[in-house]
Amino acid sequence: MEASYREKSDVAIRDALLKFECQPILFIGSGLSRRYFRGPSWQELLKEVFSYLPDGVSQYEYNRQKFSDDPIAIGSELAELMFEWAWKDGKSKFPAKMFSGKVRKDAFAKHIACRIIRERVEKADLKKSPFADELAALAAIKPHAVITTNYDLFLERILDGYEPITGQTIIRYNTNSFGEIFHIHGDVSDPSSLVLTREDYDSWTEKKKYVSAKLLTYFAEHPVFILGYGLGDPNVKAILRDIGELVADETGLIDNVFQVVWSSTAVGSNPPEQAVFSVDGQEYRTRAIHTEELLWVYKSLKSQSALTSINPKLVRALAARTMRLVRHDIPSGSVEVNYDILERVAEDNDELPKLLGITPAENVNHTHPFTLTQVADRLGLPRWHHVNKMINEIKDETGTDLRSTDNRYHCKIKTGTMAKSATRKWSHDAISLFERRLNGEKVDLQL
């Protein structure tokens, strides 16, 4: 990959995080499951479940041809065949409680599918994984939430403290919280929740609008990054079509959604900047990040002020309690209210953290997040040399070298043990200063 393209993409990702001032939402597909624990694709999973049946592999190929490789139709046929086999020669393979009129007949195929996936996840040794660095970087992102069509609970092993939300629970869930993994097609902890057959998909299609409505806040108020899905994946298109109807601009661009496009070969210097997809004659577009490596993408997604000790359970509990206070306890008069304190909280951004016992972090990467290359990109300049020229001009005109001290515009950060191991970072105030100079305005330094 061209270094310039990676730098440009890194700037785009970090700018999106800075613009929204919140953690990203990750929309994760089966590509990551396949990468990290050899999780089966949809067709591979169907084939493995078929293998439990007499002449199963042959039957799988027969049904692929019969149903023109339509996985939904194949899944429906598999559920029928598995049901017949379970009640005859396959009874010993299933719990006795499943042989009841109260249990749906597709439960047998879903039971086997969940067993296959769970065994794959359990065998995954994260410490010995060849992708250990990637997994650590993925965990370090600390996303606000994850949305996935994957059935497995592998992400719950990576993202410590995150809670799986699945099935009907999604529609009723409070999306103002933090630290959830939304399994919109079900998960292995509840086989009945899996979306596998035609009946399941018809039901999902009916409920999808409600799920999309619940997720709309995420897509409107957070940067969203799609990983592990191919371009044009029907699951992604189904959600983005509903979201796009409300948040896309007049050209069809959903500006805060990034599709990470995987390539097994080196990416050139000018891959397409947008991913385009069409649904029912309507064209929508997202921003695109092309890569043959994921580690740098994960590192770019990590917050500038690392949330190293965050406890997702605590954040969820605080959010839930706050919502109950606002929606129920205070309006109903079930708690005594000190309005002097509430007014201070409402008027001063620092009061609520103090009330909760939270100390603002003094993190230079938060106050001075930009490298000189990123500053140039924010200003629309082709290279960092142009910014450096301005800094030298300001020095000549004012007698002040912005780089000589740590100040509101600039900070020098030690990066290693060597005497010269350091990097220079620049603030939002610096960008405003340089913008005024580019516009021909008088520069008034306030160090």
Image: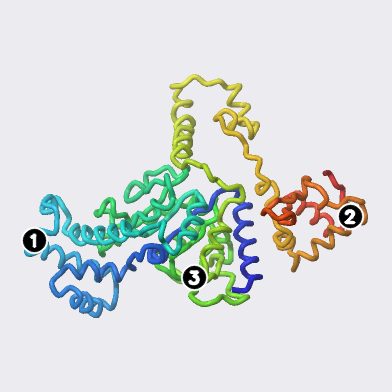
- The answer for how far apart the CA atoms under marks 1 and 2 are is 85 Å
* Residue 77 seen by the camera: no
Residue occupying the point 31% across, 56% down: 122
Q: Nearer the viewer, mark 1 or mark 2?
A: 2
Element at label 3: strand
Q: Position of residue 385 (x, y in %)?
A: 79, 65
Give the side of residue 156 with respect to residue 23, left or right.
left
Amino acid bearing label 3? Trp
Element at label 2: helix
Q: To which residue does mark 2 refer?
A: 395
**Tag 3 or tag 2, which sits nearer the N-term?**
3
Which numbered disc covers residue 87?
1
Residue occupying the point 32% across, 55% down: 186
- The answer for how far apart the CA atoms under marks 2 and 3 are is 45 Å
**Tag 3 or tag 1, which sits nearer the N-term?**
1
Q: Position of residue 427 (x, y in %)?
A: 73, 50
Q: To which residue does mark 3 refer?
A: 262
**Tag 2 or tag 1, which sits nearer the N-term?**
1
Estimate how packed mark 1 is, as few (under 14), some (14 to 19) or many (20 or more) residues with alpha carbons within 10 Å. few
